[in-house]
Image: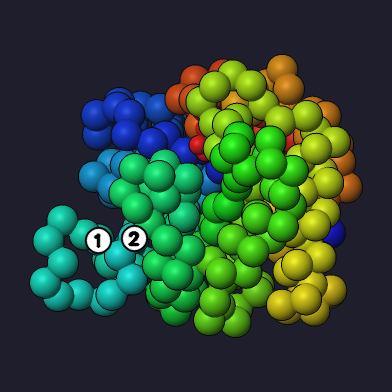
Amino acid sequence: MAKPLIAGNWKMNGTVAEGEDLAQSIRDKLGDRPEIATVLCPPFIALPRVAGALAGSEILVGAQNLYPEASGAFTGEVSPTMLAGLCSYVIVGHSERRALLGETSEFVARKAVAAAEAGLRPVVCVGESLEVRDAGNAEEFVAGQLVASLEGVTDAASLVVGYEPVWAIGTGRSARPDVAQTMIGRLRSTLGDLFGAEAASEIPILYGGSVSAENVGPFVDRPDIDGALVGGASLKPDEFVQIVKLTASIRV
Ligand code: PGA
């Protein structure tokens, strides 16, 4: 079984100073939890100070995005090599970037490959819209999206997958845990087809979409759900720490 993982996606929130305070507060409240991977993903500009606030703790740092080239004429972008000294995880393919910035699965796959080459663990996100779910082919769609978003990825050991139904993100309307388990079980078998069943069993697959301290338990209690990708609740230190502790108590 994969080691449980809770990642906080802060999205475009907070100043650098607020990010540093939030990281410090989570560190103070959480204490040492080596049995679970806790990852904080602040905006790019807060990464150095957040990494400083977490130095010497078990809490890890992630970026929310990268550009899949080492350097060059890519105005406004940040490369994997720039991130490699600052963090160890990077979210790629978040549905907000797919929807708002037109990112395709092909582009997401380039990011995942570039991340792994730089020694970062990509958190590859997939998920269906309400339209796709209502049409009844969510599983086919998301499995296909995952395969396309992993094109060229060979390093299964560095990989993390996030299943985030678009209709559940930021809406307060999370998926039913049994629905999430069904999808994530399907994604695990898709990963098995790509990398072999043993490697697939070690890849953390997270549920994301309106996760809170109140609802996280029934998700991580399911066999294939190794943790959560937390948006809104990751900005509240008490609630985020409770999510990590609850997950550790259920999953470990
Ligand atoms: P949410 O966001 O927890 O606020 O729904 C999750 C995400 O987008 O990763």
In whole angstroms, how far apart are the C-alphas of marks 1 and 2?
5 Å
Mark positioned earlier in the residue sequence (1 or 2): 2
Extreme-front residue of the structure: 135
Note whether ligand 1 is within 8 Å of mark 2: no
- State whether residue 2 is above or below residue 166: below
Q: Amino acid at mark 2?
A: Leu
Tag shown at residue 167: none
Secondary element under disc 1, as helix, strand or loop, is: loop
Q: Position of residue 177 (x, y in %)?
A: 80, 33
Seen in the image, is 164 located left or right of residue 107? right
Asked whether the beta carbons under mark 1 and mark 2 sit within 8 Å of each other, the answer is: yes
In this picture, residue 75 sits left or right of residue 234: left
Q: Which residue is mark 1?
A: 78
User: SS class of the residue under badge 2?
Assistant: loop
In percent of width and height, residue 115 lies at: 43, 69
Q: Is residue 109 above or below residue 138?
A: below
Q: As rendered, which of 50 and 78 lies closer to the eye? A: 78
Looking at the image, can residue 12 be seen?
Answer: yes
- Residue 225 seen by the camera: no
Q: Find residue 146 and report its image quarter.
A: bottom right
Identify whether 95 is placed above or below 221: below
Please, is residue 245 above or below residue 150 in the view?
above
- Quadrant location, the C terminus: top right
Residue 235, horizontal then vertical, whole percent: 46, 25
> How many discs mark residues in the rendered view?
2
Residue at figure coordinates x 67%, y 26% from the top left: 174
Tell me the residue that label 2 is attached to.
Answer: 66
Residue at x-position 32% and y-position 29%: 13
